[in-house]
Image (cartoon, rainbow, N blue to C red):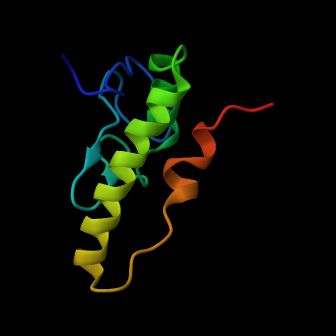
Amino acid sequence: MPYPGTAVGPVTAGGGRPGRPHLPMRPLWRCRACGAEWPCQPARLSLLVEYRDDRTALLIYLATLMAEAGDQLAQLTAQPRVDLRDRFLTWARPRG
């Protein structure tokens, strides 16, 4: 089973090549396809589509990745952990 967020297909927003999945490059947490901070816009769209019927599962998945990213980014920069909530969670919350 592929990683969640790999069903990106031909989405090319942000400069990625057609069909190239927008996945995180660890430990930098940049997109492998477009170089933007991950989750980039195409990855967000893909994740929202993939988890359209289970937003809670999406938020749990993203929170897990956020914790991993926080640890890895703190080690790279030797600075205190940055707040990654907006980058990983705020956009994925249900509206309304």
Image vertical order of residue 66 relative to residue 10, above or below: below
Q: Quadrant of residue 22?
A: top left
Q: Residue at x 39, y 54 (%)?
A: 66
Q: Residue at x 44, y 34 (%)?
A: 43
Most foreground residue, 14 or 23: 23
Most foreground residue, 54 or 8: 54
Q: Quadrant of residue 39?
A: top left
Q: Is residue 55 left or right of residue 9?
A: right
Visible residue check, residue 35: no
Q: Is residue 85 left or right of residue 57?
A: right
- x then y, percent, for residue 36: 43, 52
- x then y, percent, for residue 17: 34, 31
Q: Quadrant of residue 50?
A: top left
Q: Residue at x 54, y 47 (%)?
A: 89
Tell me the quarter of the image containing the C terminus. top right
Image vertical order of residue 70 relative to residue 89, above or below: below
Q: Residue at x 36, y 28 (%)?
A: 5
- x then y, percent, for residue 82: 45, 73
